[in-house]
Image (cartoon, grey):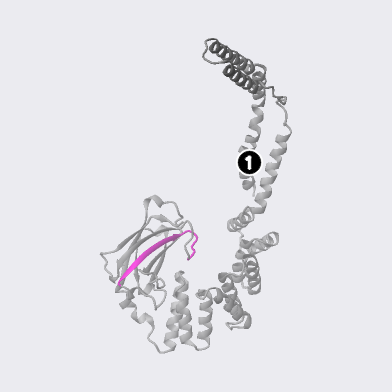
Protein backbone atom coordinates (compact mmCIF):
# COMPACT_ATOMS: atom_id res chain seq x y z
CA UNK A 1 0.00 0.00 0.00
CA UNK A 2 3.03 2.27 0.31
CA UNK A 3 2.96 3.27 -3.40
CA UNK A 4 -0.71 4.23 -2.99
CA UNK A 5 -0.02 6.63 -0.12
CA UNK A 6 2.97 8.05 -1.97
CA UNK A 7 0.69 8.73 -4.96
CA UNK A 8 -1.90 10.39 -2.72
CA UNK A 9 0.81 12.54 -1.16
CA UNK A 10 2.06 13.61 -4.59
CA UNK A 11 -1.48 14.58 -5.58
CA UNK A 12 -1.88 16.64 -2.41
CA UNK A 13 1.36 18.57 -2.88
CA UNK A 14 -0.01 20.94 -5.59
CA UNK A 15 -3.04 21.68 -3.40
CA UNK A 16 -0.87 22.51 -0.41
CA UNK A 17 1.36 24.68 -2.61
CA UNK A 18 -1.69 26.67 -3.74
CA UNK A 19 -2.55 27.30 -0.10
CA UNK A 20 0.97 28.58 0.65
CA UNK A 21 1.42 30.63 -2.54
CA UNK A 22 -0.66 33.67 -1.43
CA UNK A 23 1.48 34.03 1.71
CA UNK A 24 4.61 34.33 -0.39
CA UNK A 25 3.32 37.52 -2.08
CA UNK A 26 1.59 38.96 1.00
CA UNK A 27 4.46 41.34 1.92
CA UNK A 28 4.71 42.82 -1.57
CA UNK A 29 0.93 43.29 -1.83
CA UNK A 30 0.80 44.97 1.61
CA UNK A 31 3.51 47.47 0.64
CA UNK A 32 1.66 48.31 -2.58
CA UNK A 33 -1.58 48.97 -0.71
CA UNK A 34 0.13 51.19 1.89
CA UNK A 35 1.83 53.17 -0.87
CA UNK A 36 -1.46 53.62 -2.74
CA UNK A 37 -3.31 54.93 0.31
CA UNK A 38 -0.44 57.25 1.27
CA UNK A 39 -0.39 58.84 -2.19
CA UNK A 40 -4.09 58.88 -2.98
CA UNK A 41 -4.90 62.35 -4.56
CA UNK A 42 -8.35 61.60 -5.89
CA UNK A 43 -10.02 64.14 -3.52
CA UNK A 44 -7.77 67.00 -4.67
CA UNK A 45 -8.41 66.12 -8.29
CA UNK A 46 -12.18 66.20 -7.74
CA UNK A 47 -11.96 69.70 -6.12
CA UNK A 48 -9.89 71.00 -9.03
CA UNK A 49 -12.46 69.69 -11.51
CA UNK A 50 -15.25 71.36 -9.48
CA UNK A 51 -13.49 74.74 -9.58
CA UNK A 52 -12.98 74.59 -13.35
CA UNK A 53 -16.62 73.74 -13.96
CA UNK A 54 -17.81 76.49 -11.58
CA UNK A 55 -15.61 79.10 -13.33
CA UNK A 56 -17.07 78.01 -16.66
CA UNK A 57 -20.57 78.33 -15.25
CA UNK A 58 -19.89 81.85 -13.92
CA UNK A 59 -18.48 82.94 -17.28
CA UNK A 60 -21.66 81.72 -18.98
CA UNK A 61 -23.78 83.82 -16.58
CA UNK A 62 -21.70 86.96 -17.23
CA UNK A 63 -22.11 86.51 -20.99
CA UNK A 64 -25.82 86.23 -20.54
CA UNK A 65 -26.00 82.64 -21.81
CA UNK A 66 -27.91 81.59 -18.68
CA UNK A 67 -30.02 83.53 -16.21
CA UNK A 68 -29.53 83.70 -12.42
CA UNK A 69 -32.03 80.93 -11.69
CA UNK A 70 -30.31 78.53 -14.10
CA UNK A 71 -26.93 79.48 -12.66
CA UNK A 72 -28.04 78.68 -9.10
CA UNK A 73 -29.55 75.37 -10.22
CA UNK A 74 -26.40 74.22 -12.06
CA UNK A 75 -24.11 75.35 -9.22
CA UNK A 76 -26.16 73.36 -6.73
CA UNK A 77 -25.81 70.30 -8.97
CA UNK A 78 -22.01 70.78 -9.13
CA UNK A 79 -21.79 71.06 -5.34
CA UNK A 80 -23.81 67.88 -4.88
CA UNK A 81 -21.55 66.08 -7.33
CA UNK A 82 -18.44 67.28 -5.47
CA UNK A 83 -19.93 66.18 -2.19
CA UNK A 84 -20.57 62.70 -3.55
CA UNK A 85 -17.04 62.43 -4.97
CA UNK A 86 -15.18 63.73 -1.92
CA UNK A 87 -17.21 62.40 0.99
CA UNK A 88 -14.85 60.93 3.55
CA UNK A 89 -15.26 57.20 3.98
CA UNK A 90 -13.69 55.70 7.03
CA UNK A 91 -11.28 53.02 5.82
CA UNK A 92 -10.39 49.99 7.85
CA UNK A 93 -6.71 49.91 8.68
CA UNK A 94 -4.68 47.50 6.58
CA UNK A 95 -3.72 44.28 8.33
CA UNK A 96 -0.13 43.22 8.71
CA UNK A 97 1.37 41.05 5.99
CA UNK A 98 1.70 38.20 8.50
CA UNK A 99 -1.98 38.30 9.51
CA UNK A 100 -3.68 34.90 9.20
CA UNK A 101 -0.37 33.10 9.08
CA UNK A 102 -1.53 30.50 11.59
CA UNK A 103 -4.65 29.69 9.56
CA UNK A 104 -2.65 28.37 6.60
CA UNK A 105 -1.01 25.37 8.34
CA UNK A 106 -4.31 24.59 10.07
CA UNK A 107 -6.05 24.61 6.69
CA UNK A 108 -3.31 22.44 5.19
CA UNK A 109 -3.70 19.84 7.93
CA UNK A 110 -7.48 19.94 7.48
CA UNK A 111 -7.17 19.32 3.73
CA UNK A 112 -4.85 16.35 4.25
CA UNK A 113 -7.00 14.78 6.98
CA UNK A 114 -10.23 15.32 5.02
CA UNK A 115 -8.69 13.81 1.86
CA UNK A 116 -7.45 10.71 3.67
CA UNK A 117 -10.78 10.28 5.47
CA UNK A 118 -12.74 10.64 2.23
CA UNK A 119 -10.56 8.08 0.46
CA UNK A 120 -10.96 5.59 3.29
CA UNK A 121 -14.73 5.98 3.07
CA UNK A 122 -15.19 6.05 -0.71
CA UNK A 123 -11.88 4.94 -2.25
CA UNK A 124 -10.77 1.52 -3.49
CA UNK A 125 -8.13 0.82 -0.87
CA UNK A 126 -9.78 -2.49 -0.01
CA UNK A 127 -9.83 -3.63 -3.65
CA UNK A 128 -6.17 -2.68 -4.02
CA UNK A 129 -5.43 -4.89 -1.03
CA UNK A 130 -7.22 -7.80 -2.72
CA UNK A 131 -5.19 -7.27 -5.87
CA UNK A 132 -1.97 -7.14 -3.84
CA UNK A 133 -2.87 -10.46 -2.18
CA UNK A 134 -3.51 -12.07 -5.57
CA UNK A 135 -0.15 -10.90 -6.90
CA UNK A 136 1.68 -11.92 -3.75
CA UNK A 137 0.30 -15.46 -3.77
CA UNK A 138 0.85 -15.79 -7.52
CA UNK A 139 4.49 -14.73 -7.25
CA UNK A 140 5.23 -16.75 -4.13
CA UNK A 141 7.11 -19.99 -4.99
CA UNK A 142 5.10 -21.73 -2.28
CA UNK A 143 1.83 -20.08 -3.29
CA UNK A 144 -1.21 -22.37 -3.29
CA UNK A 145 -4.98 -22.31 -3.28
CA UNK A 146 -4.93 -22.96 0.46
CA UNK A 147 -2.66 -19.94 1.04
CA UNK A 148 -4.83 -17.73 -1.14
CA UNK A 149 -7.97 -18.91 0.65
CA UNK A 150 -6.42 -18.26 4.06
CA UNK A 151 -5.39 -14.74 3.08
CA UNK A 152 -8.82 -13.98 1.64
CA UNK A 153 -10.58 -15.26 4.78
CA UNK A 154 -8.44 -12.90 6.87
CA UNK A 155 -9.33 -10.07 4.52
CA UNK A 156 -13.04 -10.91 4.80
CA UNK A 157 -12.77 -10.34 8.55
CA UNK A 158 -11.20 -6.92 7.90
CA UNK A 159 -13.55 -5.96 5.03
CA UNK A 160 -16.88 -7.64 5.82
CA UNK A 161 -18.85 -5.16 3.70
CA UNK A 162 -16.69 -5.31 0.56
CA UNK A 163 -18.65 -7.30 -2.09
CA UNK A 164 -15.47 -8.08 -4.03
CA UNK A 165 -14.12 -10.09 -1.07
CA UNK A 166 -17.12 -12.41 -1.10
CA UNK A 167 -17.28 -12.65 -4.90
CA UNK A 168 -13.69 -13.97 -4.78
CA UNK A 169 -14.26 -16.24 -1.78
CA UNK A 170 -17.32 -17.93 -3.32
CA UNK A 171 -15.53 -19.65 -6.24
CA UNK A 172 -12.53 -20.44 -3.99
CA UNK A 173 -14.75 -22.35 -1.57
CA UNK A 174 -16.68 -23.97 -4.40
CA UNK A 175 -13.60 -25.16 -6.29
CA UNK A 176 -11.93 -26.41 -3.10
CA UNK A 177 -14.88 -28.65 -2.21
CA UNK A 178 -16.41 -26.54 0.57
CA UNK A 179 -20.01 -26.04 -0.63
CA UNK A 180 -21.40 -24.84 2.71
CA UNK A 181 -18.77 -22.09 2.97
CA UNK A 182 -19.35 -21.24 -0.70
CA UNK A 183 -23.08 -20.86 -0.07
CA UNK A 184 -22.42 -18.70 3.00
CA UNK A 185 -20.09 -16.45 0.97
CA UNK A 186 -22.67 -16.13 -1.81
CA UNK A 187 -25.44 -15.34 0.67
CA UNK A 188 -23.28 -12.62 2.20
CA UNK A 189 -22.69 -11.20 -1.30
CA UNK A 190 -26.45 -11.18 -1.89
CA UNK A 191 -26.96 -9.29 1.38
CA UNK A 192 -24.58 -6.58 0.15
CA UNK A 193 -25.49 -6.34 -3.56
CA UNK A 194 -29.16 -7.24 -3.28
CA UNK A 195 -31.25 -10.16 -4.52
CA UNK A 196 -30.45 -9.80 -8.21
CA UNK A 197 -31.09 -12.67 -10.68
CA UNK A 198 -27.47 -13.64 -11.49
CA UNK A 199 -26.56 -14.08 -7.80
CA UNK A 200 -29.80 -15.85 -6.93
CA UNK A 201 -29.27 -18.19 -9.89
CA UNK A 202 -25.75 -19.10 -8.72
CA UNK A 203 -27.04 -19.80 -5.21
CA UNK A 204 -29.87 -21.92 -6.62
CA UNK A 205 -27.39 -23.89 -8.73
CA UNK A 206 -25.07 -24.46 -5.76
CA UNK A 207 -27.92 -25.55 -3.48
CA UNK A 208 -29.30 -27.77 -6.28
CA UNK A 209 -26.11 -29.78 -6.56
CA UNK A 210 -25.69 -29.84 -2.77
CA UNK A 211 -29.16 -31.45 -2.63
CA UNK A 212 -27.96 -34.12 -5.11
CA UNK A 213 -29.79 -32.56 -8.07
CA UNK A 214 -33.17 -32.35 -6.35
CA UNK A 215 -35.50 -29.37 -6.39
CA UNK A 216 -35.85 -29.19 -2.63
CA UNK A 217 -38.08 -26.38 -1.30
CA UNK A 218 -35.13 -24.04 -0.71
CA UNK A 219 -33.92 -24.48 -4.30
CA UNK A 220 -37.45 -24.19 -5.71
CA UNK A 221 -37.97 -20.91 -3.86
CA UNK A 222 -34.74 -19.52 -5.30
CA UNK A 223 -35.72 -20.69 -8.80
CA UNK A 224 -39.15 -19.08 -8.54
CA UNK A 225 -37.72 -15.80 -7.21
CA UNK A 226 -35.13 -15.65 -9.99
CA UNK A 227 -37.57 -16.42 -12.80
CA UNK A 228 -40.02 -13.86 -11.44
CA UNK A 229 -37.35 -11.21 -12.05
CA UNK A 230 -35.81 -12.68 -15.21
CA UNK A 231 -37.75 -15.46 -17.00
CA UNK A 232 -34.81 -15.97 -19.39
CA UNK A 233 -32.10 -16.48 -16.72
CA UNK A 234 -29.92 -19.19 -18.34
CA UNK A 235 -28.40 -20.68 -15.16
CA UNK A 236 -31.82 -21.40 -13.67
CA UNK A 237 -33.12 -22.76 -16.99
CA UNK A 238 -30.09 -25.06 -17.08
CA UNK A 239 -30.97 -26.34 -13.60
CA UNK A 240 -34.55 -27.05 -14.64
CA UNK A 241 -33.27 -28.86 -17.72
CA UNK A 242 -31.01 -31.12 -15.62
CA UNK A 243 -33.82 -31.90 -13.20
CA UNK A 244 -36.22 -32.73 -16.05
CA UNK A 245 -33.60 -34.93 -17.74
CA UNK A 246 -32.89 -36.85 -14.51
CA UNK A 247 -36.61 -37.56 -14.18
CA UNK A 248 -36.99 -38.77 -17.76
CA UNK A 249 -38.83 -35.64 -18.94
CA UNK A 250 -36.66 -35.25 -22.04
CA UNK A 251 -38.95 -32.91 -23.96
CA UNK A 252 -39.06 -30.51 -20.99
CA UNK A 253 -35.27 -30.76 -20.65
CA UNK A 254 -34.79 -29.89 -24.33
CA UNK A 255 -37.15 -26.94 -23.98
CA UNK A 256 -35.36 -25.56 -20.90
CA UNK A 257 -31.90 -26.00 -22.43
CA UNK A 258 -32.88 -24.39 -25.72
CA UNK A 259 -34.26 -21.37 -23.87
CA UNK A 260 -31.03 -21.18 -21.91
CA UNK A 261 -28.99 -21.37 -25.13
CA UNK A 262 -30.81 -18.34 -26.48
CA UNK A 263 -29.36 -16.22 -23.68
CA UNK A 264 -25.80 -17.56 -23.38
CA UNK A 265 -22.77 -16.20 -25.19
CA UNK A 266 -20.15 -18.33 -23.44
CA UNK A 267 -19.21 -20.93 -26.08
CA UNK A 268 -18.18 -23.64 -23.58
CA UNK A 269 -21.46 -23.47 -21.68
CA UNK A 270 -23.41 -23.35 -24.94
CA UNK A 271 -21.56 -26.43 -26.20
CA UNK A 272 -22.41 -28.36 -23.03
CA UNK A 273 -26.08 -27.47 -23.35
CA UNK A 274 -26.14 -28.51 -27.01
CA UNK A 275 -24.64 -31.86 -26.02
CA UNK A 276 -27.39 -32.25 -23.44
CA UNK A 277 -30.04 -31.48 -26.07
CA UNK A 278 -28.58 -34.10 -28.41
CA UNK A 279 -28.55 -36.79 -25.69
CA UNK A 280 -32.15 -35.95 -24.75
CA UNK A 281 -33.15 -36.22 -28.43
CA UNK A 282 -31.48 -39.62 -28.62
CA UNK A 283 -33.44 -40.78 -25.57
CA UNK A 284 -36.64 -39.68 -27.33
CA UNK A 285 -35.64 -41.54 -30.50
CA UNK A 286 -35.28 -38.30 -32.43
CA UNK A 287 -32.47 -37.87 -34.94
CA UNK A 288 -29.81 -35.78 -33.14
CA UNK A 289 -29.14 -32.34 -34.53
CA UNK A 290 -25.54 -33.35 -35.29
CA UNK A 291 -26.85 -35.37 -38.22
CA UNK A 292 -27.58 -32.11 -40.02
CA UNK A 293 -24.19 -30.48 -39.40
CA UNK A 294 -22.87 -31.00 -42.91
CA UNK A 295 -26.01 -29.48 -44.43
CA UNK A 296 -25.89 -26.60 -41.98
CA UNK A 297 -22.33 -25.77 -42.92
CA UNK A 298 -23.39 -25.17 -46.50
CA UNK A 299 -25.47 -22.09 -45.58
CA UNK A 300 -24.04 -19.17 -43.67
CA UNK A 301 -21.66 -16.23 -43.85
CA UNK A 302 -17.88 -16.10 -43.96
CA UNK A 303 -16.75 -13.04 -42.00
CA UNK A 304 -13.40 -11.29 -41.78
CA UNK A 305 -13.07 -9.16 -38.65
CA UNK A 306 -10.37 -6.53 -38.14
CA UNK A 307 -9.62 -3.74 -35.68
CA UNK A 308 -9.45 -0.16 -36.91
CA UNK A 309 -5.92 1.24 -36.84
CA UNK A 310 -6.97 4.12 -34.57
CA UNK A 311 -8.07 1.62 -31.89
CA UNK A 312 -5.05 -0.67 -32.03
CA UNK A 313 -3.46 -0.79 -28.60
CA UNK A 314 -6.55 0.54 -26.82
CA UNK A 315 -7.50 -2.92 -25.47
CA UNK A 316 -5.52 -5.87 -24.14
CA UNK A 317 -4.73 -8.78 -26.44
CA UNK A 318 -6.70 -11.18 -24.23
CA UNK A 319 -9.94 -9.13 -24.42
CA UNK A 320 -12.90 -11.18 -25.65
CA UNK A 321 -14.31 -10.68 -29.16
CA UNK A 322 -17.92 -11.73 -29.82
CA UNK A 323 -18.86 -12.16 -33.49
CA UNK A 324 -22.64 -12.39 -33.78
CA UNK A 325 -25.20 -12.72 -36.57
CA UNK A 326 -28.74 -11.50 -35.88
CA UNK A 327 -31.92 -11.22 -37.93
CA UNK A 328 -32.33 -7.74 -39.40
CA UNK A 329 -35.47 -6.99 -37.36
CA UNK A 330 -33.81 -8.02 -34.08
CA UNK A 331 -36.80 -10.16 -33.09
CA UNK A 332 -34.97 -13.50 -32.70
CA UNK A 333 -32.16 -14.57 -30.37
CA UNK A 334 -28.65 -14.45 -31.88
CA UNK A 335 -28.54 -16.68 -34.97
CA UNK A 336 -24.86 -17.56 -34.62
CA UNK A 337 -22.09 -16.62 -32.23
CA UNK A 338 -18.34 -17.18 -32.45
CA UNK A 339 -15.88 -15.91 -29.86
CA UNK A 340 -12.21 -15.04 -30.22
CA UNK A 341 -9.58 -12.76 -28.70
CA UNK A 342 -8.13 -9.43 -29.81
CA UNK A 343 -4.73 -11.10 -30.29
CA UNK A 344 -6.26 -13.20 -33.11
CA UNK A 345 -7.41 -10.19 -35.14
CA UNK A 346 -7.70 -9.93 -38.07
CA UNK A 347 -9.58 -13.22 -38.16
CA UNK A 348 -11.87 -14.98 -40.61
CA UNK A 349 -14.66 -17.17 -39.21
CA UNK A 350 -17.73 -18.96 -40.52
CA UNK A 351 -21.14 -18.24 -39.04
CA UNK A 352 -23.46 -21.15 -39.79
CA UNK A 353 -25.95 -23.32 -37.94
CA UNK A 354 -23.20 -25.10 -36.02
CA UNK A 355 -22.64 -21.78 -34.22
CA UNK A 356 -26.34 -21.35 -33.38
CA UNK A 357 -27.35 -20.79 -29.79
CA UNK A 358 -30.80 -22.31 -30.25
CA UNK A 359 -32.31 -24.69 -32.82
CA UNK A 360 -35.24 -22.27 -33.00
CA UNK A 361 -33.00 -19.42 -34.19
CA UNK A 362 -30.48 -20.43 -36.85
CA UNK A 363 -28.79 -18.42 -39.56
CA UNK A 364 -30.04 -20.77 -42.29
CA UNK A 365 -33.59 -19.61 -41.48
CA UNK A 366 -33.01 -16.09 -42.86
CA UNK A 367 -31.92 -14.64 -46.20
CA UNK A 368 -30.16 -11.59 -44.82
CA UNK A 369 -28.49 -10.97 -41.47
CA UNK A 370 -26.86 -8.20 -39.53
CA UNK A 371 -23.30 -8.81 -38.34
CA UNK A 372 -22.30 -7.35 -35.00
CA UNK A 373 -18.82 -7.59 -33.51
CA UNK A 374 -18.07 -6.46 -29.97
CA UNK A 375 -14.79 -6.36 -28.05
CA UNK A 376 -15.41 -6.81 -24.33
CA UNK A 377 -12.39 -6.16 -22.04
CA UNK A 378 -14.50 -7.41 -19.10
CA UNK A 379 -15.69 -10.53 -20.92
CA UNK A 380 -19.30 -9.69 -20.03
CA UNK A 381 -22.08 -11.02 -22.25
CA UNK A 382 -23.99 -7.74 -22.13
CA UNK A 383 -22.51 -4.55 -23.64
CA UNK A 384 -20.61 -2.33 -21.20
CA UNK A 385 -19.51 1.31 -21.61
CA UNK A 386 -16.06 1.32 -23.15
CA UNK A 387 -16.60 -1.81 -25.28
CA UNK A 388 -15.51 -1.54 -28.90
CA UNK A 389 -17.82 -2.59 -31.71
CA UNK A 390 -18.47 -2.68 -35.41
CA UNK A 391 -21.37 -3.89 -37.51
CA UNK A 392 -22.47 -4.60 -41.05
CA UNK A 393 -26.12 -4.67 -42.11
CA UNK A 394 -27.95 -6.51 -44.87
CA UNK A 395 -25.44 -9.33 -45.39
CA UNK A 396 -26.71 -12.14 -47.62
CA UNK A 397 -26.85 -15.68 -46.21
CA UNK A 398 -26.05 -18.40 -48.70
CA UNK A 399 -23.57 -21.08 -49.74
CA UNK A 400 -20.25 -20.45 -48.03
CA UNK A 401 -17.44 -19.65 -50.43
CA UNK A 402 -13.74 -19.78 -49.67
CA UNK A 403 -13.20 -16.77 -51.93
CA UNK A 404 -15.82 -14.38 -50.51
CA UNK A 405 -16.11 -12.89 -47.04
CA UNK A 406 -17.98 -10.02 -45.46
CA UNK A 407 -15.62 -7.48 -43.87
CA UNK A 408 -16.47 -6.00 -40.46
CA UNK A 409 -14.19 -3.34 -38.99
CA UNK A 410 -14.31 -2.66 -35.24
CA UNK A 411 -14.21 1.13 -35.32
CA UNK A 412 -16.45 2.56 -32.57
CA UNK A 413 -16.66 2.76 -28.80
CA UNK A 414 -19.85 1.84 -26.97
CA UNK A 415 -20.98 4.76 -24.75
Picture quadrant of residue 21: top right
The spot of residue 68 in percent (x, y) is 58, 15
Side of 333 relative to 173 (left or right): left
Query: Is residue 92 part of the magenta span, yes or no?
Result: no
- Segment tinted magenta in the rendering: 367-381
Side of 105 relative to 365 (left or right): right
Picture quadrant of residue 32: top right
Name the residue at the right extreme. 102
Secondary structure of the residue carrying tag 1 is helix
Q: Which residue is mark 1?
A: 12
Seen in the picture, residue 310 relative to 355 is either above or below; the reply is above
The spot of residue 227 in percent (x, y) is 54, 76
The kind of secondary structure the magenta stretch mainly shows is strand
How packed is label 1: few (under 14 Cα within 10 Å), some, or many (20 or more)? some
Seen in the picture, residue 43 relative to 414 is either above or below; the reply is above
The spot of residue 240 in percent (x, y) is 53, 81
Front-lying residue, 254 or 282 = 254
Q: Residue at x 39, y 67 (%)?
A: 324
Total label count?
1
Q: Residue at x 59, y 14 (%)?
A: 54
Q: Residue at x 26, y 68 (%)?
A: 401
The spot of residue 129 in percent (x, y) is 63, 55
Q: Residue at x 48, y 65 (%)?
A: 382
Amino acid sequence: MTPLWIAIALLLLPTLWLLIAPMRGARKLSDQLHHFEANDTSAEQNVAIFRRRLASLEAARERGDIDEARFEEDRLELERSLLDDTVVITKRPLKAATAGKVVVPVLMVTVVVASVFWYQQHGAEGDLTLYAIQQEVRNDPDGSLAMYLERMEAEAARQPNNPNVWSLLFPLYRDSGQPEQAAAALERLIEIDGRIPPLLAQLAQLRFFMAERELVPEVQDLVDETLAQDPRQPTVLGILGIYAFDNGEYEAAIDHWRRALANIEDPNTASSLRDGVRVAQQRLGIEPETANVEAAQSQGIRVTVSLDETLVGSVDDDAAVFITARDREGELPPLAVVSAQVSELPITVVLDDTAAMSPDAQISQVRDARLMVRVSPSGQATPQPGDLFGDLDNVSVGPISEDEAANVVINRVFE
